[in-house]
Image: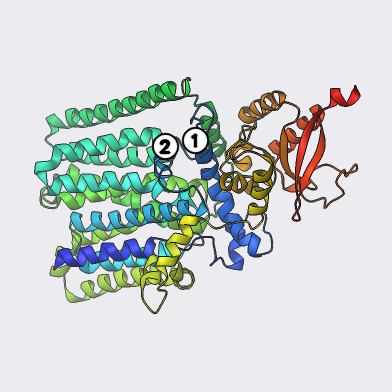
Amino acid sequence: MRWLVDAGAVALVIMTVTDVSAYLEYLRPDARTVVLADGLAVSPETLGYAQRLHQGFWLAPLNDMLHGRAMLVDVSSQYGVGVFYFLAAFFQVAPLGYGTLSLLTGFLTALQYATAYGVMRLGGCPGILAVPAITAAVIGLLLGSLGSPADFPGTGGLRFGLGWLVAACAVLWTRWPGRRRSLQAAAVALVGIASVWSFETFAVVSATFLAVAAFEAAALEPGRRARSFGRNMLAAACCCVFAHLVLAIGTRAFAGSWPDWSTYLAFVRSYAGGLYVLAVRPWSPGLPILFLHLASAIALAALLARRHRLVLERRPLLLGIAATSGLGIASFGYFVGHSHPNTLLYVALPAVVEACLWVSLVGDRLLQAPRAPRLVATAAGVWLAVLLAISGWPDATDKWRRTALDQAIPGHGGRIREAVPRLWRSPPSDSRAPEAQALLDRHLPKGEPALVITEPELSVETLVRSDRVNVLPIGDPEQDNLVPDETYPKVRRAIDRLAPGALMLTQLGVFDAPAKPLGVRPDARRKLVKLQKVALDRIRERFRLEEVARSPRGFALMRLVARQEEQR
């Protein structure tokens, strides 16, 4: 019966967390202060802006990779390296688009929450505590947030999932001693994979593994501790070196060049230097969670130092606490860099699991305590769980219809057979993109690279939908503009190689007044990022632009004509 309850709980978690709607249809007007950088008035186009902005950071590098360009050679992204090879493998089967990326990231986040539930149960947390805890976490942390991992891939399983797998391996090898070596090898391998996955994921995974290795060493006799810890750290380091060798040799064989980490490291330095960091109030809501992680680590160290009998009796549970404490402390760094209360919800899951494991540890003693302390402790736990669920309830009721569970219930949502294929087809996020795509398809051969300078998010969607890459080394203009020292020289060199007669897709109004050669609205150029403006100005220095075609919604296809020919 317990296994059936656990299987049902995992299935419900996966169905509730998996988002089959996407496209930010639920977005409240007051959410724009968090997810809409420029605070535009909410409109149908604005509702999709947040999704285009955040998913464009992922889709643009993937689009380049799927067209033969290599990561760390022709392509770079702030979100990592190995993660894009994982996604590229998925998109060998699935069509590239906003909908398919939303479906995948939502499902991976669902697996992350299911794994967290598994860590609680395998660690020894009773179902009567674990089920309400994961329910409150799903409602309060996920459905209660302003965004969704389906729309913001960097907030869910793609970033934190590997850390939870390490925690699960650690708990499992104490439950199944016969499979200890294989599970330890899997945990070590995950550290190596994380070292090329992304900087943030490597921090989370290595902190989790470090906490597990430290617990395992501290639980041994004094003479064996250093050897055990050193052996685990050496194995993890060797795995990291091996992963980087595989990446380097594979990149050399595929692209004919060794990986160049300079652009990726420039992204890391940009964010480490305070890019997009929000001010933290003196009493941030993140402080209680940080104190919980620190108190958990200190209490665990005290138990190990005293050689308490619980270390042997409740080893799976204590190892789960060690893993989630390390994972939680490392994940908290994401909140430090993006210190808004909504961001805290994305990194609070380890605190929920950690708290439940501690409650389970003291549960036996609590049952032996007098009635009054038992009632107070029980009431406090119920109050915290209810408070977490209630805090996310207003948003959860709006977002509930997006879940696979709602869409699978006959007579309620009941449209999952329509919702999933809809995401698979990736309907336009910006209604102007099909028009820009049609203009390219009429004048350029299918699949041929295109020179595109339009609004940043619109350029990404146009290229993805038309199955093309940009002639210029600009994948996502918003992202590439973050590291000008790395991208500007590459763009200038690419423009210098352009031949007369090339076609450029742009928007009416991207050219500076007072000339107003196309006589259209003046706000189009304002929406370009500086990198695009530099590229456009350099193109106009070399070429005269001759209009070939225009569309009703303000797109223009221009032919580049050499100014030397004009003079002759």
Residue at the image point whose x is 56% and y is 43% from the top: 467
Residue 47 percent across, percent down from the top left: 60, 62
Q: Is residue 497 visible?
A: yes
Name the one closer to the observer, 40 or 423. Answer: 423
| Residue at numbered disc 1 | 65
State if disc 2 and disc 1 touch (CB < 8 Å).
Answer: yes
Residue 124 in percent (x, y) is at 17, 58
Please give left or right for residue 506 compared with residue 353 in the image. right
For mark 2, give the secondary structure.
helix
- Which residue is nearer to you in this view: 506 or 189? 506
Q: Amino acid at mark 1?
A: Met
Q: Is residue 194 above or below residue 350?
A: above
Reply above or below: 97 against 255: below
Label 2 amino acid? Tyr
Residue bearing mark 2: 85
**Nearer the observer, 466 or 164:** 466
Q: Position of residue 284 (x, y in %)?
A: 49, 56
For this orientation, the residue located farthest to the bottom is: 411
The answer to whether any part of residue 308 appears in the image is no
Quarter of the image that includes the N terminus:
bottom left
Query: In which quarter of the view is residue 460 placed?
Result: top right
Give the residue at x 57% y 68%: 28
Task: Say what secondary structure mark 1 lies in.
Answer: helix
